[in-house]
Image (cartoon, grey):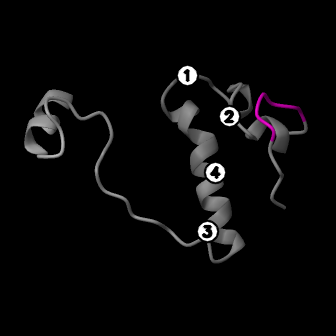
Amino acid sequence: MMERAGKKNGNNKNWQLWQQHNHPIELTDNVILDQKLNYLHMNPVVSGFVSEPESWNWSSEIDYAGGKGLVDIILIE
């Protein structure tokens, strides 16, 4: 799959690991911010790495759940 994507893209020689497109989303209010934060926190769960988002060591969800994660963050409230 990565080899096929790399051959389609003239900017690469053989392989492409990341998607080329970029669609920025303006975080205009807390509803959108909460939606994106929830999406980030649920990624390890959806991928099957953990059963609860606060179980992922590199997630800020640990801090939101009252613990202390491996990454220093500023809580958004």
Image position of 19 (left or right of 27): left
Q: Cα distance, mark 2 to mark 4?
A: 9 Å
Pick the front one: 69 or 20: 20
SS for dot 1: loop
Image position of 53 (left or right of 77): left
Q: Which residues are magenta?
A: 67-72
Along the polypeptide, which appears first: circle 3 or circle 2? 3
Which quadrant of the figure contains the C terminus?
A: bottom right
Which quadrant of the figure contains the N terminus?
A: top left
Residue 62 appears at what percent x and percent y?
79, 35
Please name the residue that numbered disc 2 is placed on.
53
Q: Is residue 1 visible?
A: no
Name the amino acid type tagged 4. Asn
Along the polypeptide, which appears first: circle 3 or circle 1? 3
SS for dot 3: helix
Residue 48 lies, with reference to residue 63, above or below; the image says: above
Please name the residue that numbered disc 4 is placed on.
38
Residue at 30 percent of width and 45 percent of height: 19
Q: Which mark is residue 32?
A: 3
